[in-house]
Amino acid sequence: MAWNGPYQSRFLRLDPAKGRFQVHRSAYNDPAVFQEEMERIFAKTWQVVGHESEIRQPGDFIRRPLAGRNLIFVRDRNGEAKVFFNTCPHRGAQFCQENTGNRKTFVCPYHGWVFRNSGELANQNTDYGYTSDFNDDGRYNLQSVPRLEKRAGFYFVNMDPNAISLDEYLAGAGDRLDLLMLHSPAGLEVISGVHEYQIKANYKLLCENSYDGYHLESTHRSYVEYMMTVNKGVDLSQIGGRAISFGNGHACFELRIPTGRPLAQPLPYWGEEACAEIEAKKKDLFERVGPEVGDIVANTNRNMIIFPNSVINDQQTILLRTIVPLACNLMLVRAWAIGPVDESPLLRSLRLEGALSFLGPGGFATPDDVEMLELCQIGYENHDTAWNDISKGFHLGEDSLRTVDPKYNNELQMRAYWTQWDKMMTGGQQASAKLAAE
Amino acid sequence: MYSRQQTRLSIEGFVYHEADLLDRWKLDEWVELWTDPCTYEVTTVGESDPETTSPEKSLFLIGDNRFRLEQRVVRLNKTSAHVEYPHSRTRHLFTNVIVTDESADEIAAQVNFVVFRTKRSVTNHYMGYSLYTFAKMGDALKIRRKRCILDLEGLVPQGKLSILL
């Protein structure tokens, strides 16, 4: 769907001939729009719930919040991954309070109903009052989410039983996820420790920020200066890269940036031992996957968003970040570092060092992002001003949902997001003349 | 017993001074309180074994060596450290000092903290305890290691840890 002429909906105002792409601020700060998003977007799209390595053994479970829902992600007695709503089918109490653990059964603390980790009701903690066929159709078992599917080790859920398959939904982004599987034949694991923080801003501001190449110089000037100090001899002005829009609103930027990767891009200041180990890994990688794919895996960094709220970055470390929208002006962010299962302690420490210095709410960069997003949200309190701008690189004929922009620091990524978002929120309908005139 | 009390008083005097430097944003002087090398760490919330895990194995909030500690202060002194420019107001309360170990050249102590941070009329607090290792340098003490363990279930609602604990 290429933008070949002016377009206006409740939320978008586009004039491709003039290179203008604007988003109405009600999309960020109107509680009614937020409610609409919950129904039209979060009840219909695939969202990451966790990684297979987080529930290795039968009985392993993790509690996970998701847009408007509390879930538990569990490996059941048969080794199958399941996701249940964390609410008792009896009176509704949240039955699991632990964040993580291993259990054969879950017991609701209210009346003592007992459930196997596969979800079946085992007993109701009483000898009388219920018929023997009370649960013969399973209606009192723990309720599973309607859809649960896996790609590249990541489990995704969807609340819409009629949703298209995960593979179809991911479109071109699926191939980029698959690249992660090439990091090690032994597989990947989520490293212990989670960065969890709340930002007083609309969740889409963090989506935009997560693959915004344009803000680096201004927002992160102090971080860039730090990197120049650490990484002497590396010219960060030579960053090159592109943005890719994969279809269905998923997009990334893909950079060639010499900041080092314990996987296959050594930095001299990491020392001889680490460099030798990384060179050996790189050689092994190229032998396994060939020079073309090997080059992408070894030498490119990606910040990617799976629409609408799953961030998967492939940098010095792999970072999974889920953005939980709590209100139109509030979100909860949770982020994990991911690395090869068979990584040496030395390379693991380099991976984590990278994750710490830039990312995370105690790092040299993320706190400034948090500040910028909160300043945007405060700015929207000026109701007399109505529009945000996402125009950088926009031109007549751009197919924002599926194209490549040779400049990573244009704003195609966000236009991919907003085009999909607008399509789901408005059905792509042109707004009334009254709105258009505003 | 008496000597333990003397040690505790020394530690209290030290951390009160540390708190004062932090609240007055005299960060260059704060760096001078540390040995070289040193480690300054803040574990992630929900870490199952926050006293013994290491930033080489687990994701931390902060895992600074001497170089990164200095760079953290260099950054916080810049106007381009947007989140702390203008500086927030902070009040560090360091209390409940327990000397846990003492040798000829080191003292280990546990210190509770509550830190209030105010910016744009919003006050957030960070509370928890710190495990210190002090180096005896003649008559003076310096911090060789400080690990802060937050009593939080996430940086909710703080959103970030942009100040020093």
Image: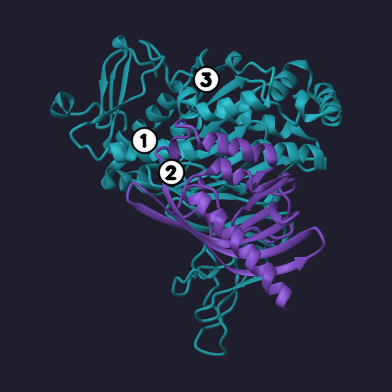
On the rendered image, what quadrant is the C terminus of chain A found in? Answer: top left
Q: Nearer the viewer, mark 1 or mark 3?
A: 3
Q: Colour of chain B?
A: purple
Image coordinates for residue B37, horizontal then vertical, percent: 74, 43
Q: Which chain's residue wears label 1?
A: A
What amino acid is found at the position of numbered circle 2 in the picture?
Answer: Lys
Dot 3 alpha-carbon crowd within 10 angstroms: few under 14, some 14 to 19, many 20 or more: many
Shade of chain A as shown in the rendered figure: cyan
Q: Chain of mark 3?
A: A
Q: Mark 1 or 2 closer to N-term?
A: 2
> Marks 2 and 3: CB-CB under 8 Å?
no
The answer to the question of whether label 1 and label 2 lie on touching residues, with beta carbons closer than 8 A, is: yes
The three-letter amino acid code for the residue at tag 3 is Ala
Tell me which label, 2 or 3, sits earlier in the chain.
2
The residue singled out by tag 3 in the image is A243
Q: Which mark is residue A424?
A: 1
Residue type of the residue flagged with mark 1: Met
